[in-house]
Image (tube, helix red, strand yellow):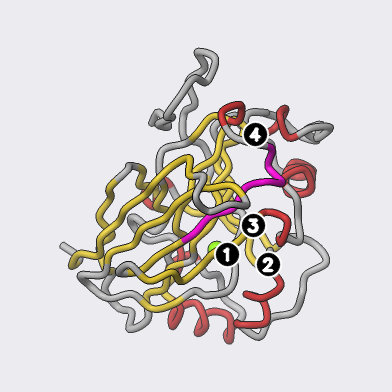
Amino acid sequence: MELLFEGDTGGRIYELGTIYCIGRNYVEHIKELGNEVPQDPVVFTKPFCAFRQGAYTAIEYPPGTENLEYEGELVICLRSSGRDVPTFSTADIIAGYAVGIDLTQRDKQSEAKKKGLPWTLAKGFDGSAQMSHFIPFGAVPPFEELGFSLYVNGELRQRAFTNQMIFSPEMMVSYLSKTMSLRSGDLLFTGTPAGTGKLAVGDKIFMQLHTKNPNYVFVDFHAELIPWH
Ligand code: MG
């Protein structure tokens, strides 16, 4: 499946690869969930069926949960491939940026965590990886100057900046590619800041990718919660 970009990628086409997600990358959110600050990135993946991309998407409220939560995140489309990817500069490893939601069945995830079991069903269901179109790396300011905001029904719930992350893209890519062969078109959900919360059918989510000044916006994303069908 071809990833959608707004702007010039230098003629390159990016096919959807593996969806990697980083957990616990913002200190405030770690405190919120009562977790420990990690030494290394916490990594999990989402399956192909989780992927949804567009300027406007629908989120089906999944069955079997009483607590579906949004996790607003900056999403990176990887440019480089291989094992032990050199990470001298972000230009080498990043093809583009999107804003997205790592949807989580928090009740199911907490249950799995308690039992020491995998989170796959809590975080990998259909449509659990939602994202905007990608903006090419060259079309926005350097990584360190980016941020994003997430609104639910018009109310600001999450706003974060890349300089608040524990792990940089170079660190994440270097860590992952030590043992996993990366592919151009792999996606990296870079973790969520404080302010995650519950969703209900009918809720409207709005996200923006911006600079340190939230008025300088590069991409908009809208999603609406609908019943599972
Ligand atoms: Mg997340």
Disc 1 under 8 Å from ligand 1? The reply is yes
Q: Mark 3 vs mark 2: which is more N-terminal?
A: 2
In the image, is 121 to the left or to the right of 78?
left
Mark in front: 3 vs 2: 3
Disc 1: which residue: 192
User: Looking at numbered disc 3 in the image, what kind of residue is underneath it?
Assistant: Phe
What is the distance, in whole Å, between disc 4 and disc 1 at their CAs? Answer: 19 Å
- Element type where label 4 sits in the image: strand
- Element type where label 3 sits in the image: strand
Residue 191 placement (x, y as % from top left): 60, 60
User: Looking at numbered disc 2 in the image, what kind of residue is underneath it?
Assistant: Tyr
Residue 52: give its label.
none
Q: Mark 1 vs mark 2: which is more N-terminal?
A: 2
Disc 2: which residue: 26
- Is residue 148 found inside the magenta-colored segment of the image? yes
Are the residues at dot 1 and dot 2 in contact (C-beta closer than 8 Å)? yes
Residue 94: give its label.
4
What is the distance, in whole Å, between disc 2 and disc 4 at their CAs? Answer: 20 Å
Residue 13 placement (x, y as % from top left): 48, 20
Quarter of the image with the N terminus in it: top left
Q: Residue at x 34, y 55 (%)?
A: 127
Where does the magenta region start and end? 142-149
Mark 2: few/some/many CA within 10 Å (<14, 14-19, 20+): many
Mark 4: few/some/many CA within 10 Å (<14, 14-19, 20+): many
User: Looking at numbered disc 4 in the image, what kind of residue is underneath it?
Assistant: Ile
* Depth check, front residue: 218 or 41: 218
What is the distance, in whole Å, between disc 1 and disc 3 at their CAs? Answer: 11 Å
